[in-house]
Image (spheres, rainbow, N blue to C red):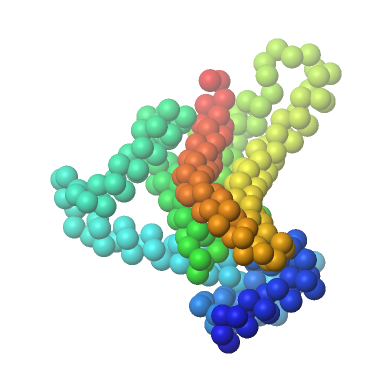
Amino acid sequence: MSYSEAVTETVEKHEQTGLGDFIIHHIQDSPEWNVLGYHIHLPTFKPIHLLGIELDLSITQHVVMMWVASLMLIITFGLLFRKRKLVPTGFAAILETMVLFVRDEIAIPNIGLKDGKKLTPLLATLFFFILTCNLIGLIPLFSTATGNITVTASLAIITFISTQVMGMVKNGVIGYWKSMVPHGIPFPLLFIIVPIEIFGLFTKPFALAMRLFANMIAGHTVIYALIGLIIAIGSYFVSPFAIGFALFINFLEILVAFIQAYIFTMLSSLFIGMAMHPEH
């Protein structure tokens, strides 16, 4: 298919579906991966019914993006740190600086010196995985896995489970749940405070999932909306402005990718620290 035919097909498809459907088509998950015009159909499986719940384990584009991000991290860290050096150089030094930043500026201040060092591998893994998924989503051949609510919800569930487990390990099962109730409050208020505290346990990971999902999908929506203006208006004169603003938003998304990875990791460490040290 020539370029002119592709443009004509895109215009005709836009006229039939509208700009909104054009944007949704490009930001939502898909059972196929479009690589340089070739549609790679990913494996699909029959849903599994477990305890009345239908589980679809089919491979989608965002699943592949998570695999790519994980593989990139494993290969990068494996190659750069296969031989330990006293003073890393090059890109290894940059990665070590970022790991030390997670340990010294996120884990230790929120969790404590001893426990913060123990949980640095978990927090660093969350940080680098989210950052990699955010960044590869800016490459045209790839998509943003963190723009999928199920992905961000899964990451938030990891934080939720880690928070409860570490809180009970540090304070004991009874001590952890007892620490949620402030000391000295009248007995009747327990019927109000306890449900609020339990509800708060679930609102924290929900906020984590929604914040990351909304911020990542918002930037891509703006970019596709700006590009879609060229087709919607049907004039090449708007192209320099639309593409110029789209490039600006794309560069801004690089900053957002780092900020959102930092915020998710920082809040995760804060929630874990609050569960482990409720008296602070």
For the point 59% across and 40% down, the residue is 164
Which residue appears at 76% of the width and 30% of the height?
196
Q: In what quadrant of the picture does the N terminus appear?
A: bottom right
What residue is rendered at 67% in x and 59% in y? Answer: 229
Tell me the quarter of the picture where residue 60 sits: bottom right
* Residue 140 appears in the picture as rendered: yes
Question: On screen, 58 above or below 233?
Answer: below
Between 42 and 3, the one nearer to me in the picture: 3
**Tally of marks:** 0
Vertical comparison of 158 with 186: above or below? below
Residue 138, percent across and down? 50, 58
Residue 134's place in the image compared with 98, above or below, is: below
Q: Nearer the viewer, residue 19 or 35?
A: 19
Q: Residue at x 31, y 57 (%)?
A: 77
- Any part of residue 166 in sight: no
Where residue 55 sits, quadrant-wise, is bottom right
> Is residue 87 toward the left or the right of residue 251 in the image?
left
Q: Residue furthest front?
A: 237
Q: Is residue 20 left or right of residue 151?
A: right
Judging depth in this view, the residue of 103 and 221 nearest the camera is 221
**Residue that lies at the very extreme toward the left in this rendered image:** 86
